[in-house]
Amino acid sequence: MTVSIEAIASSPRLLRLSVLVALFLLLAQFVLGMFVNLYIGIPSGHPGSSASFLTGAVPGLAWAIRASAPALAVHTGLGILLGISSLALLAIAIASRERPVVAAAAVGLLGTLGAGIGGVGFLNYGVDKTTFLMAVGFSVAMGAYVAALFAIPHPGWPAVLERDEAGARG
């Protein structure tokens, strides 16, 4: 018995698990971000903080992972993992060919990227307004992934719907 990559990637079970992992990572990132916000100070002169956004992002993230407080390092690494997992989730959704799930995964990716951009802005420049961007990005991604969960087809749904319709007619 051979199983194709398409068959695995289009599995509703894999899709549902991927969405749940993304939701869990988002929640963990949110809680860790609140901890960092309340208890960790970010020095203003770290690598990347004096450069433009594009040229300062990589040095700032590298500094946060290797030389900052452990909570900030984990928060930064988890943010990068969230970006990668959001891309993977979109790829799995595309393989599933479920348009509503693809749309939700794309919106979730945009929310995650928006939160990440806000995070880099806050890390490198300390602008408080970027925390709003992180919150909006988190909310958009969370809402999109919850919507994706409801859009993923379940094998038992047609039978349940048929029974409900038969009961309503009878």
Image (tube, grey):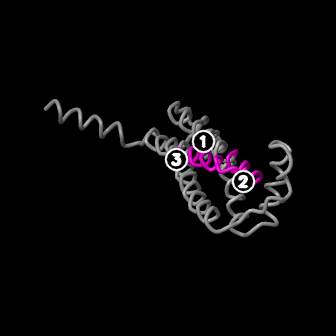
**Horizontal and vertical percent for residue 59?**
85, 53
Query: Which image quadrant is residue 141 in?
Result: top right
Q: Secondary structure at mark 1?
A: helix
Residue at which label 2 appears: 126
In the rendered structure, which disc, 2 or 1, sits on the residue that comes first in sequence? 1
Of circles 2 and 1, the one toward us is 2
Amino acid type of the residue tagged 2 in the rendering? Gly
**Horizontal and vertical percent for residue 18?**
57, 49
Residue at which label 1 appears: 111
How many residues crowd mark 1 within 10 Å: few (<14), some (14–19), many (20+)?
many
In space, the residues marked 2 and 1 are separated at their CA atoms by 21 Å
Q: Which residues are magenta?
A: 117-139
Whether residue 149 is situated above or below residue 33 in the rendered picture: above
What residue is drawn where x is 76% and y is 51%? Answer: 125
What residue is drawn where x is 56% and y is 36%? Answer: 96
Asked if residue 129 lies left or right of residue 152, the reply is right
What residue is drawn where x is 60% and y is 34%? Answer: 94
In space, the residues marked 3 and 1 are separated at their CA atoms by 8 Å
Q: Secondary structure at mark 2?
A: loop
Decide which of 23, 63 is in the foreground and name it. 63
In the rendered structure, which disc, 3 or 2, sits on the residue that comes first in sequence? 2
In the rendered structure, which disc, 3 or 1, sits on the residue that comes first in sequence? 1
How many residues crowd mark 3 within 10 Å: few (<14), some (14–19), many (20+)?
many
**Quick check: marks 2 and 1 in contact, CB under 8 Å?**
no
Circle count: 3
